[in-house]
Amino acid sequence: QVQLVESGGGLVQPGGSLRLSCAASGRIFNSYDMGWFRQAPGKQRELVATITTGGMPNFGDSVKGRFTISRDKAKNTVYLQMNSLKPEDTATYYCAACGFRRFLNVPPNFGADYWGQGTQVTVSS
């Protein structure tokens, strides 16, 4: 059974930063593209950022220039560094894994094989 466990969410003021982490099962990590997605109440899940097995990132338009994604193969962990946070970034953030192909930009599942349980990020003063 593959498990993805997110951490690092919380409450932050506008303009602040947070780093989310997603720890993945070791046997899948190096073979899977990894991604972060988010869903705000009453809204559709959206792509935040993905990273290929080779380390190539891709970002949703709303976070370009503010968020970065990275992966540490030694720790089987993918990170989402979020800077210059805005109230509209408030959402539940989900980690996902996609094996042997790229994520699809098709909500709500985006072609993912596995999902984490999510971590809440709230941006508010």
Image (cartoon, rainbow, N blue to C red):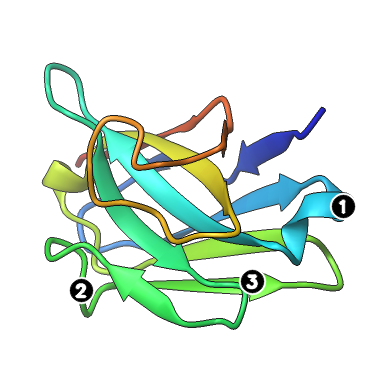
Residue 9 appears in the rendering: no
Give the Cα separation between the discs numbered 1 and 3. Answer: 15 Å
Mark 3 and mark 2 lie on one chain; the one further toward the N terminus is 2
In the depicted structure, whether residue 62 falls above or below residue 44: below
Q: Residues within 10 Å of mark 2 (few under 14, many from 20)?
A: few
Mark 2 and mark 1 lie on one chain; the one further toward the N terminus is 1
Query: SS class of the residue under badge 2?
Result: loop
* Image-quadrant location for residue 75: bottom right
Amino acid under disc 3:
Arg
Give the Cα separation between the discs numbered 3 and 2. Answer: 18 Å
In the depicted structure, whether residue 65 falls above or below residue 11: below
Name the residue carrying label 2. 64
Q: Nearer the viewer, residue 11 or 51?
A: 51
117 left or right of 74?
A: left
The image position of residue 12, as x and y in percent, is: 35, 47
Residue lying at 79% horizontally and 61% vertically, measured from the top left: 76
Q: Nearer the viewer, residue 105 or 59?
A: 105
Name the residue carrying label 1. 27
The image position of residue 65, as x and y in percent, is: 22, 80
Q: In front: mark 1 or mark 3?
A: 1
Quadrant containing the C terminus in the rendered view: top left
Give the Cα separation between the discs numbered 2 and 1. Answer: 30 Å
Give the number of the disc on residue 71.
3
Amino acid under disc 2:
Lys
Residue 81 appears in the rendering: yes
Q: Residues within 10 Å of mark 1 (few under 14, many from 20)?
A: few
